[in-house]
Structures are given as C-alpha cells and as structure tokens.
Amino acid sequence: MLRCEILSVGTELLLGDILDTNAQYLSVQLASMGIAVHRRSTVGDNAERLSREVRQALSRSDLVLLTGGLGPTADDITKEVCAEVMGFSLVRDEKALEMLRAFILKKYKNVPQTNLKQADVPDGGTVFYNDHGTAPGVAMERDGKCVVLMPGPPNEMRPMFEEKVKPFLLQKTGGVIVSHTVRTMGIGESAMAEAVADLLQGSNPTVAPYAKQGEALLRVTAHAENDAQAQRLTAPVLREIQSRLHTYIYGVDVDSIQQAVVEALIAKKLHVATAESCTAGYISKRLTEIAGASAVFDCGVVCYANAVKQKLLGVREETLQAHGAVSEETALEMAAGVRALGNADIGVSVTGVAGPGGSENKPAGCAYIGIADKDGVRAVRFETGRDDREYNRYVTASKALHLVWQSIQKY
C-alpha cells in the first residue's frame, strides 16, 4: 500500500486567513482509494523550509501531495523548490501556455508577464492541464518516489484531482478501488464501532468508522483487479452491516440526510412542510439544497414570536401559557399546524434553546421536535449536550430531518 503525505503550502494558511479544506478533501479521497495518509503538514512560502519539509516527507513516504504555491507571484515557489528536490529542470509547456492565455483573456485585455512562469513544467514529468484556472498541476517521479503538485484554490484543485490526478494515482495502486459509505444517525461512533468490531479487523475489504456532526459513518473499501471483483468483496460486508445496524442506517452512498429525505419523498410522492423556531429555517435550507426539492417541499415557517405561532400554525394561547414556547405540547401543535397549512403529508416542527445559556430544565441544545403524519402527532425531546449555538442548530436540524426520513418509511 502506498504511504502518502499531504503538504499544504501558503503563509496565509499558517496565519489562519484561509481555512485548509484541501487537506481534508484529499484525505477522504485518498482513503477511498486505499492510499494511506500518514501525515498532513502546513508550511509557509519560504524556500528553505519548504525544501526541508518535502525532503523529510519523501524520506518517510512514497507519495507526497502538495497544494498551493503555483501562482504567478514571487512567493509562489512550490514548483521550483520541488523540481530542485527531485532533480528536474523546468521547461515552458506550449499547451499550458496556450490554455493560460485563453483563460486570462476571457476576463482581461492582456496577459501579465508574471503569469507566464505558470506554464513552466518539469522536463520529463507528468502535466495535469488546468481547465479551471491558470496553473497546471504536475507530477515528478524518481527512485520510487512521487511528488504531485496541485493549485491551492479548491475550485481548481478538486476538479483537477477528480479528473486527472486520481486516475494517475489509481494506476499506481494496481487494479481498482471500490468504496461504499454507510450513514447512520441515532447511534454514536463508539457504539457503532462496537457493533461491527469484528468487521473492522478485515484487510480487504477494510471497514473504517468516522464521526460527523450528529451522525456516524462506516466506509467499506475493497481493492481488486476490476470493479466487479471489488463489488463482490464489499457486498457481503455491506449486508452484514445493514443487518446489525438497520435501525440506524438512513442510506448507503448518499451525501447527506437531506438528500436521503428528498429522494425518499420523491420516490413515494409525498410532501413535507416545516415549522422552525430555534433552527430558524435550517431544515428548509438543507432540504432546498437538494435538486428536486421543489416537488416535495410545500412551505416553511420560521416563527420565533408566539403571536406568529398562534396566527399561522394555530398554536393555542393556553398551550403557550401553560407549557411555554419550548415544550413538547407546543412542538406537537406546531407540527400539526404546519402540516395543515401546507396541506402536506408530513409536518415537522422544532422549538428549543439554541444557546448560549438556557435553564436547568431546558439547557442550551435542548429542543422539542414534532412530527405530524398519517399516524398522528408525536414529539421527542432532543439534547445535544453542548452550549454551542451553531452546532446546536445544525445537529437539531439533522435530528429533525432524520425523524422525517423515519416517517416516510411508514408510507
């Protein structure tokens, strides 16, 4: 198995001016390909330090992926430093130059001389032409070691990796890699891992647990000579996982709970409506991120004020006075009210305390989520256990979406 390191280049990353999403993206992609990432590092735009980092990475690993430092300015030195370390000379690439000029002239009248150096590539290396920017990516190989350079902007790096670098790397792994992701909610990462502990010991396919906000994932990855063989290796493992965790699984190879919800609604020709207080439209926002949501999402009501809850959703004044806005009773009436308002099959409501602060009985992260469907109306109390406003809003919305998904299964 290839040993790999990721090196992010840019002083702006060290200063915190830019969040390094490239390293996270590449780690996920490489893991799905069966390439083990042993280390991730960040270095500024300094030739001496960058050279030292690259040499050290090559002493430990077979493959080093670098992002950033391929721009036109004097401090963009990644290509020059790596060429020196690997013993390559740089030459002007006419195709890269032509693509660079065409890209710049779409927006500007002239091509700055400083940009021309971006068309210089290692003589004898592999060039990954950039369809989304001015800097091509490159790969340099020597003595069993490989260095791959890609642009820093994610909108350039990601398509370059997917379309060009990934196929290049797959040739080195021998055969193909197939990966499937099982998504769960309602169970923590530790409990999930315990339920499939024996499966985590396998070598081909491998099973690896991951935690995300409000959910836990299992990635099943197999390596084989061809796709059909790899699929045959993963199939029995996926069946076993589904047998053990079926109560918690909401999808396999789906990107998000909102995708699973919208696809399930479309498949069953159902409609949903939302009523939100503390999540302030987060459920509606996430539903409408998915293409096709307009066919199944009827309406969303954001109602912080009690008067709006009463006027639009029919929440009774007696309920609010007796139990308060943050209560099971209010969540029930909100869910029933928005279902009726939108003439929907499913109504979902959220009322709670996003934070900061709260009370002993209703701390930050406490919410009541109501569901109204063909079987009636019910509500659950949900607590995140954290005094983090944004986290609480996101995870509570995820829980509400999961309850909607469960409701859909009954139709």
Image (cartoon, rainbow, N blue to C red):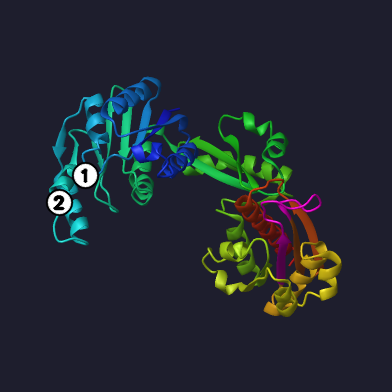
Residue 272, percent across and down? 66, 70
The residue labelled by disc 1 is: 72
Q: Earlier in the sequence, mark 1 or mark 2?
A: 1
Q: Are marks 1 and 2 in contact (CB under 8 Å)?
A: yes
In the rendered image, which quarter contains the C terminus?
Answer: bottom right
The residue labelled by disc 2 is: 112
Say which residue appears at 56% left-offset and 50% top-offset: 253
Say which residue appears at 40% left-offset and 45% top-offset: 18
Q: What amino acid is found at the position of numbered circle 1 in the picture?
A: Pro
Q: Quadrant of residue 352?
A: bottom right
- Label 2, secondary structure: give it: loop
- Label 1, secondary structure: give it: loop
Q: Is residue 347 magenta?
A: yes
Above-or-below relation of 334 to 85: below
Q: CA distance from mark 1 to mark 2?
A: 9 Å
Q: Nearer the viewer, residue 137 or 382?
A: 382
Tell me the magenta residue range: 346-366
Above-or-below relation of 352 to 96: below
